[in-house]
Image (cartoon, grey):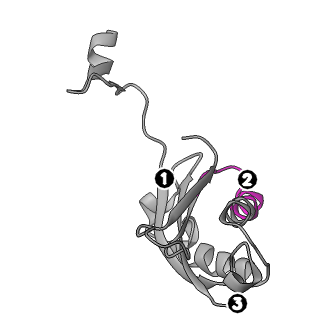
């Protein structure tokens, strides 16, 4: 098979290589939590809404693709519960630190997976900042 059949160009000129299969990924979007976070003690006095979005790439396809059994894959409810407890048991001032610690926590539990985490502080106390602030860290995809 020639490269012309494997690599296609999109309308924007980006190359798509169809010879490499996509590794399976689990994406968890907008896990919402109320947390005490902020650079000042005044800001940390009131809980603020954050959300976490996580992308996890399996090294191989989970056998749940065939078995349809939860035990044969990563349970995203367990990921959520573990992260919620981890965040509650720690104190953070900055979203960068919280995101990095959450990433490290997940990476220690799932070392064979590539993981990327985005933390969204939805309503920081800055007048005019309507969309919040996001910080992303982890493995490159």
Tally the marks. 3
| Gap between marks 3 and 2 measured at Cα | 35 Å
Give the image quarter of residue 22.
top left
Relative horizontal placement of residue 10, taking residue 94 as reference (left or right): left
**78 and 49: which is toward the camera:** 49
| Gap between marks 1 and 2 measured at Cα | 15 Å
Q: On the rendered image, what quadrant is the C terminus found in? A: top right
Q: Residue, x 79% and y 78% (percent of image)?
A: 91
Compare marks 1 and 2 and give the one earlier in the sequence: 1
Give the image quarter of residue 35.
bottom right
- Above or below for 140 versus 72: above
Q: Position of residue 48 (x, y in %)?
A: 58, 83
| Gap between marks 3 and 1 measured at Cα | 37 Å
Q: Is residue 5 magenta?
A: no
Q: Dot 3: what SS?
A: loop
Give the image quarter of residue 117.
bottom right
Compare marks 3 and 1 and give the one earlier in the sequence: 1
Q: Position of residue 75 (x, y in %)?
A: 56, 72
Q: Residue, x 64% and y 45% (percent of image)?
A: 139
What residue did someone put label 3 on?
A: 45
What residue did someone put label 1 on?
A: 25
Q: Position of residue 88 (x, y in %)?
A: 72, 84
Would residue 1 be visible to someone looking at this image?
no
| Residue with the most extreme bottom position | 46
Of discs 3 and 1, which sits in the foreground? 3
> Which portion, as a residue range, is magenta?
103-117
Q: Residue, x 59% and y 77% (percent of image)?
A: 80
Q: Dot 1: what SS?
A: strand
What residue did someone put label 2 on?
A: 111
Of discs 3 and 2, which sits in the foreground? 3
- Above or below for 21 versus 17: below
Q: Dot 2: what SS?
A: loop
């Amino acid at each position: 098979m020639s490269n012309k059949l494997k690599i296609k160009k999109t309308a924007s000129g980006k190359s798509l290589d169809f010879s490499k299969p996509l590794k399976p990924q689990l994406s968890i979007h907008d896990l919402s939590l109320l947390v005490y976070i902020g650079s000042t003690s005044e800001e940390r006095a009131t809980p603020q809404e954050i959300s976490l979005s996580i992308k996890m790439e399996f090294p191989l396809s989970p056998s749940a693709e065939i078995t349809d059994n939860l035990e044969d894959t990563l349970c995203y409810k367990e990921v959520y519960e573990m992260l919620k407890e981890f965040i509650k048991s720690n104190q953070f001032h900055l979203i960068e630190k919280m995101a990095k610690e959450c990433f490290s926590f997940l990476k220690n539990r799932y070392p064979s997976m590539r993981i990327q985490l985005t933390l969204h502080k939805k309503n920081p106390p800055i007048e005019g900042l309507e969309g919040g602030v996001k910080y992303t860290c982890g493995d490159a995809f």
